[in-house]
Image (cartoon, rainbow, N blue to C red):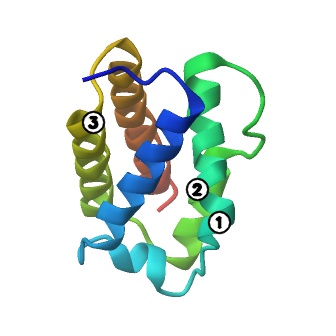
Amino acid sequence: MKDVTERKDLDFIVKEFYIRVLADDKIAPVFTSEVKINWEIHLPIISDFWENILWGGNKYQDNLLQKHLDFNDKIPLNKLHLERWLLHWRETLNNSFKGTNATEILNRAEIIGRFIMYKIQEGK
């Protein structure tokens, strides 16, 4: 297996991840209920985020934490959502990539996900 080395790898990961998430009845409702997501816009933004994480730059300009806090106001997120999100993220990466960048993405996703969940719980 190859490592994550270019933008098209990130686009693939993000697309495959959301295919998994939307097929999971425990987490799919978060993405398909009240909040309507324009996937053509959303997916490249998520790839921008991971591109910034891996290779720097400033393609992702939003406030990730605030986006999730705002989302939580509409659809409450809980630990199960985080665990399912991380499960699908790990499986998506582990099924197609191996190497330093793949490991970095996995580690960062874990840290970021847990931080967001901490901030959500802190606000309750």
Q: Are marks 3 and 2 in contact (CB under 8 Å)?
A: no
Question: Which residue is found at the position 36% from the left and 64% from the top?
Answer: 19
- Locate residue 51: give its quadrant: top right
Relative to 117, does residue 94 appear above or below in the rendering?
Answer: above
Q: Is 79 located above or below residue 14 in the figure?
A: below
User: In 3D space, how far apart are the residues under numbered discs 3 and 2 (Cα atoms)?
Assistant: 18 Å
Q: CA distance from mark 1 to mark 3?
A: 23 Å
Q: Is residue 90 above or below residue 21?
A: above
Amino acid under disc 1: Glu
Q: Which mark is residue 43?
A: 2
Q: Residues within 10 Å of mark 1 (few under 14, many from 20)?
A: few
Tags 1 and 2 touching, CB below 8 Å? yes
Residue highlighted by disc 1: 40
Question: To which quarter of the image does residue 102 belong?
Answer: top left
Instruction: Tell whether label 3 touches label 1 (CB within 8 Å).
Output: no
Q: Earlier in the sequence, mark 3 or mark 2?
A: 2
